[in-house]
Amino acid sequence: IMYHSSYCVVYAVLDFSDPFSTEVNPRILLMGLRRSGKSSIQKVVFHKMSPNETLFLESTNKICREDVSNSSFVNFQIWDFPGQIDFFDPTFDYEMIFRGTGALIFVIDSQDDYMEALARLHLTVTRAYKVNPDINFEIFIHKVDGLSDDHKIETQRDIHQRTNDDLADAGLEKIHLSFYLTSIYDHSIFEAFSKVVQKLIPQLPTLENLLNIFISNSGIEKAFLFDVVSKIYIATDSTPVDMQTYELCCDMIDVVIDISCIYGLKEDGAGTPYDKESTAIIKLNNTTVLYLKEVTKFLALVCFVREESFERKGLIDYNFHCFRKAIHEVFEVRMKVVRSRKHQSQMQKNKRATPNGTPRAPL
Ligand SMILES: Nc1nc2c(ncn2[C@@H]2O[C@H](COP(=O)(O)OP(=O)(O)OP(=O)(O)O)[C@@H](O)[C@H]2O)c(=O)[nH]1
Ligand SMILES: [Mg+2]
């Protein structure tokens, strides 16, 4: 009964016959044993729930599907699964689900004995791979806030080793798994989710390239392109990401949006806290400047600039202007592609409806 009801939900909202529906909206699945933290991750990253509140979350009893379409590049669906999925339940059509999936996140509770989780992981990954070898398998070694640094590394090594051994034993060493140490009590979960999402953005190399050109011509140390609502960064330049830098950027976005909500809206509460005029400069006491600017309705650029480079703010602003224009062009192309694909698949459907390809004469 449990799966029967979710099954209905799935069918009601998605048109699986449309091969392009998943390409436009890649699907991300959250799977793992009960209480591993799947729903908490979704709530914290996409609903701004505070980590402590997740203590009161109820166990999920059917597949919950959510659209994240608040950003021009990041349009995807997240499917939160109940802990125990029975692959042998005939009403649970996992083949259909895996076929349209871009990324499968498997959450493992690192504070618990994880042997059962690893067996589940193996079963899930091998099943999914058989149906769709293009899925990205993303393993979140979760709740690491409870582990010491040494213990974290040891746990990751152990899980990595065991899962790869299991795959090798099954003759499936070609399956690639990515591992992340995550916790909802710090920024690691946002970082991990950023990487998962980035792999699903086909324009990523273009965005990275634009960011590289922009920072090298402007004397900027590091730049992130952020989805303002989720604080996922959808791209950054190719210099390495350091966690503290990322955390500072997240905090800056929070500060800007909070101040803007309090003082930026009109008397009657009209307007939005983030718009074309949104920009902020924060000078840190270590001669670094944080510079935020609006790129699109949903994206912001956050840069790390040394004080002496920031003296040439005119240059930075001019280069930013060019960068912003380029991003909008990339976006335009994407919209055109999406529109023409929709059109194409509509045409195919119409053709299917009229077998000989010629429209029926109206009766
Ligand atoms: N310490 C710690 N606890 C966490 C973390 N993430 C989630 N939790 C806790 O783990 C418990 C289970 O979280 P849920 O999100 O309901 O787990 P779930 O995987 O959705 O569980 P089911 O829906 O039953 O499959 C909650 O009490 C959370 O507060 C984390 O990063 N660290
Ligand atoms: Mg849940």
Image (tube, helix red, strand yellow):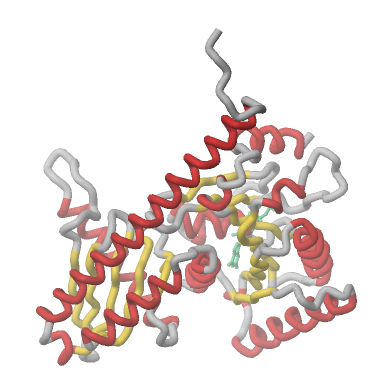
Q: Quadrant of residue 11?
A: top right
Q: How many marks?
A: 0
**At x 44% / y 66%, what residue is drawn?**
203
Against 150, residue 80 (above or below) is: above
- In the displayed structure image, the side of residue 224 where residue 187 appears, left or right: right
Locate the C terminus by quadrant: top right
Q: Quadrant of residue 300?
A: bottom left
Against 88, residue 153 (above or below) is: below
- Residues 218 and 155: in front is 218
Residue 160 drawn at (x, y percent)? 73, 81
Residue 126 drawn at (x, y percent)? 81, 64
Locate the N terminus by quadrant: top right
**At x 66% / y 27%, what residue is drawn?**
355
Against 173, residue 128 (above or below) is: above
Residue 340 drawn at (x, y percent)? 45, 46
Residue 184 visible (yes or no): no
- In the displayed structure image, the side of residue 26 where residue 117 appears, left or right: right
Residue at the far top in the pictured view? 363
Residue 71 visible (yes or no): yes
**At x 53% / y 36%, what residue is drawn?**
346
Residue 59 drawn at (x, y percent)? 67, 48
